[in-house]
Image: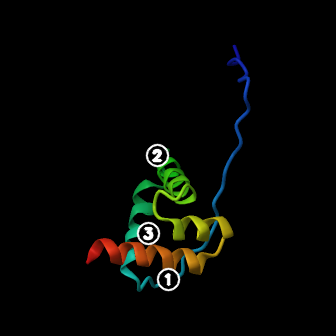
Amino acid sequence: MAPKKRDIPSERVRLDGYQQFPIIDPREQKFWDWYLENRKNRRAFTMAKILIIAALHGEMGSQIQQAVEHGDTEEATAALDDLLDAYMT
């Protein structure tokens, strides 16, 4: 017997991109290692979704929120660098 159809439909979400090699930046290498370890797990999408939601709601800082809303990758990277510098020093 077929499973009962859900009242609210779901939609497939894809975030496509390319990773250039060799990876020189240790931060990108850490991402790549995480990706390789988790790409077949269902939790990888959930973790990425939680980070994006936090950035959009300003929970990681207002600079990051504005950069993510505008879709400006360079601005978002700079804002994340500023945030990391504040915590690392």
Helix or strand or loop: what does disc 2 sit on? helix
Residue tagged 3: 32
Instruction: State whether residue 44 is above or below residue 25.
Output: above
Q: Amino acid at mark 1?
A: Phe
Q: Residue at x 70, y 37 (%)?
A: 10
Q: Which mark is residue 43?
A: 2
Q: Earlier in the sequence, mark 3 or mark 1?
A: 1
Tag 3, which secondary structure?
helix
Q: Residue at image x 40%, y 62%?
A: 34
Q: Residues within 10 Å of mark 2 (few under 14, many from 20)?
A: few
Q: Are marks 2 and 3 in contact (CB under 8 Å)?
A: no
User: Distance between the Cα atoms at labels 3 and 1?
Assistant: 11 Å
Residue density around tag 3, few if under 14, some if 14–19, many if 20 or more, within 10 Å: some
Residue 81 picture location, percent across and down: 43, 78
Residue sitting at x 57%, y 78%: 75
Give the residue at the far top of this rendering: 1
What's the residue type where badge 3 is placed? Answer: Trp
For disc 1, the marked residue is: 21
